[in-house]
Image (tube, rainbow, N blue to C red):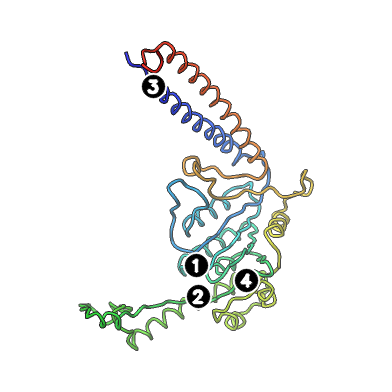
Amino acid sequence: MNRPRPWFWIILSLFVLFIVGVMGMSLITIAVSDGPALGERVGLIDLSGAISDEGTRGVLGGGSPSGARAFIRNVQEAHADPSIKAVVIRINSPGGSAAASQEMYAAVRRMAADKPVICSMGDLAASGGYYVAAACDKIYANPSTLTGSIGVISGFMNFQGLLQKYGVGSDTIKSGKFKDAGNPTRPLTPEERTLFKSMIMNVYYQFVNDIVAGRKKATGGKLTREAVLKLADGRVYTGQQAKANRLIDETGGLYEAVRYAAKEGEIDFERDRDGEPDVKEIGSLGLFDGLFGASADSSAARSLEAIGGAVGAAAGKAFTDSALKRMKAETQHSSYPEAR
């Protein structure tokens, strides 16, 4: 009777070692991620990259999920978590979809009605990135952060000359004169330009009005609609320039934003051993986040993750040692030619 070859036991052992180790780490993280023992915390939500109405992530779940839907889910999670007393939104985005930015802005405004929400700008928080920031109670930016770029843009390609050069034509049948507006095989008509201009300006004024509404509390109403219109010509500002124009409130980094959020949330963190607020990062842990939905929790969760990994690794090692001993015994007593 043929017995499994040695490599079978090696592969099986390595697989079990991996599964047991990661499961041990993940399950312990889950046990503490939402538990009251960790006390009051500051929630940290990341908004990075171009803004679009997406809700997907990589097949392995690595990194932070991108898109408006994922961001809004994170906001809702932080809003509903009673242990999170204040939230910091870290923005590093050039902007993107106007509608997606508007929806994210609305989600942050809803949360800000119940909890302090502070924005921390990274390298760039422009256009739609600034749109979302304007919904926060207070905005921090580094002196060299690039922000602003308040405006709306839409571009249309015209390949007519190129197509004519190579003898390529295009015929369009449409139900109305605007049905193919923006057709890249011809220039825009004067009527189409007027139509698109009116659409762009309508969205632009929505953007401006939301900035005024979002910044009213932080500026005491001093950032008026007229003031925003003067600033909102599409240009970007440094953090220092933005503060001078009341587009942001303070110059500082994530550290300052988190500490301010903790104080606004009445978290007594200065009595802790390290004197720093506990932070819960809302979003992806990586490979197993999609399966278990766990979130990282400051120092306590990271310590327990290490313990879980060690426990899992020990269990996996015991299994591997046992399998190798079994493999060695079977090889010595088998009829395999290489063992004779």
Q: Which residue is mark 2?
A: 206
Q: Which class describes the residues within 10 Å of circle 1: few (<14), some (14-19), or many (20+)?
A: some
Give, as a three-letter code, the residue at label 1: Gln
Neighbours of disc 3 within 10 Å: few (<14), some (14-19), many (20+): few
177 with respect to 93 (left or right): left
Under mark 2, the amino acid is Gln
Among the two numbered marks 3 and 1 on one chain, the one whose residue lies closer to the N terminus: 3
Q: As displayed, is residue 68 above or below residue 202?
A: above
* Image disc number at residue 215: 4
* Residue farthest to the right, as pictured: 271
Say whether marks 3 and 1 touch (CB < 8 Å): no
Q: Quadrant of the N terminus?
A: top left
Q: What's the mark number on residue 102? A: 1
Relative to 192, does residue 10 appear above or below in the rendering? above
Is there CB contact under 8 Å for labels 2 and 1? Answer: yes
Give the label on residue 230, or none.
none
The residue positioned farthest toward the top in the image shown: 333
Camera-side residue of 290 and 117:
290
Could you give the CA–CA distance between mark 3 and mark 1, rounded to whole angstroms? 60 Å
Mark 1 to mark 4 CA distance (whole Å): 15 Å
Q: Which circle's residue, 2 or 1, is located before the other in the chain?
A: 1
Measuring 39% from the left and 81% from the top, which residue is drawn there?
196
* Relative side of 258 to 23, left or right: right
Q: Secondary structure at mark 4?
A: helix
Tag 3, which secondary structure?
Answer: loop
- Mark 2 vs mark 3, foreground winner is 3
Say whether disc 4 or disc 2 marks the residue closer to the N-terminus: 2
**Residue at (57%, 73%) from the top-left corner?**
211
Q: CA distance from mark 3 to mark 4?
A: 69 Å
Residue with the mark numbered 3: 5
Query: Marks 4 and 2: CB-CB under 8 Å?
Result: no
Mark 2 vs 3, N-terminal side: 3
